[in-house]
Amino acid sequence: MNEPGVMAGTGGEFRAGFAALAGRPNVGKSTLLNALVGAKLSIVTPRPQTTRHRILGLVNLPHAQIAFVDTPGLHHGARRALNRAMNRTAASALADADVVLFVVEAGRWTAEDQLALERVAGSGRPAIAVVNKMDRVRPREAALPYVAQLAARHAFVDVVPCSARSADNLDRLLQRIAALLPPSPPLFPPEQVTDRDTAFRITEEIREKLTLELNQEVPYGIAVAIERMTEEEDGRLAVAAVIWVDREGQKPIVIGEGGERLKRVGRAARIELNRLLGRRLHLELWVKVREDWADNAQALKSLGLE
Ligand SMILES: Nc1nc2c(ncn2[C@@H]2O[C@H](COP(=O)(O)OP(=O)(O)OP(=O)(O)O)[C@@H](O)[C@H]2O)c(=O)[nH]1
Ligand SMILES: [Mg+2]
């Protein structure tokens, strides 16, 4: 067992390990990962159940290396195979973590927060509660009763209020996490930022832009896969990607009138990817129907969702 108070004081040893971001959907785990690492590695939307994979993000401090792991939000009603896979992915990240960051939204406590806390407690890992979205709480002291209630729900090592959006109090959070990691040399080379490749980041950006364009129901039925990626003579990266929808009726919604929606999505994704990848892209998007892909084990496997 880690003895945080003791370990934090034992001086100069280098520390390294895994810190999993866990919590119900939509509390801001991915926003927090991006803010902590200082790079957009994980997509963010106002809709719950945005993240579907575990995503690594590395932070190097003078005395520690923290390997953050973003996870899908833990949720109820895991009806489809996709949802079960998402919950499994999150649970397995907890099992592998040295520290768990249990993320909640300031002022809110729901049945899914309770479910997520039970998973965190069940992992037996030291946990820090992160009270996110503090930028919405004015004055800050108004969050004190909430923080006290949260502290009583579990033996957290610490409760840290912060704002991922305005990068508030993240330094304190980094120091707290580092102190809980085991003494170890760095686990990853210092220049590495994530474990995800260009193809993954392209499919995710397309899914983000599409989700931002769509109404409540459709995003849960879409997936994106790269069909072809080739270097063009003019230095651009040519990418053909397929947007899978799980019902015929969703196809016209995704394409939009006269193809307008798909064009907007492609443009928004291309602009952001040009910036993120530091290179120009030529992006071609297709929409195809694959009935009930979200309940089809083979389809999930081909999308890297198991
Ligand atoms: N006001 C405010 N909004 C935030 C903050 N952090 C995240 N958000 C917003 O909360 C929404 C959800 O953020 P995500 O980072 O996608 O949340 P998540 O926990 O990763 O969600 P899932 O991937 O669905 O589990 C987005 O609209 C974010 O912009 C914050 O510190 N303050
Ligand atoms: Mg997320």
Image (spheres, helix red, strand yellow):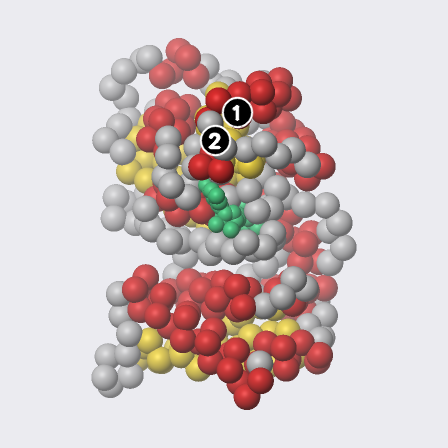
Residue at the disc numbered 2: 138
The image's mark for residue 218 is: none
**Image location (x, y in percent) of residue 100:** 51, 32
Residue found 48% across the figure and 54% down from its top:
44
Residue type marked 1 = Ala
**Image location (x, y in percent) of residue 280:** 28, 74
Front residue (pair 27, 82) = 27
**Mark 2 CB lies closer than 8 A to ligand 1:** no
Residue at the disc numbered 1: 142
**Rendered position, 49 above or below 252:** above
Could you tell me if the residues under marks 1 and 2 are in contact, i.e. CB atoms within 8 Å? yes
Dot 1: within a 10 Å radius of its alpha carbon, few (fewer than 14), some, or many (20 or more) residues? few
Residue found 41% across the figure and 70% down from its top:
268
**Rendered position, 296 above or below 289:** above
**Rendered position, 179 above or below 113:** above
Residue type marked 2 = Arg
Dot 2: within a 10 Å radius of its alpha carbon, few (fewer than 14), some, or many (20 or more) residues? few
The residue at the far bottom in this view is 258
**Quadrant location, the C terminus:** bottom right
> Disc 1 and disc 2: Cα gap in Å?
7 Å
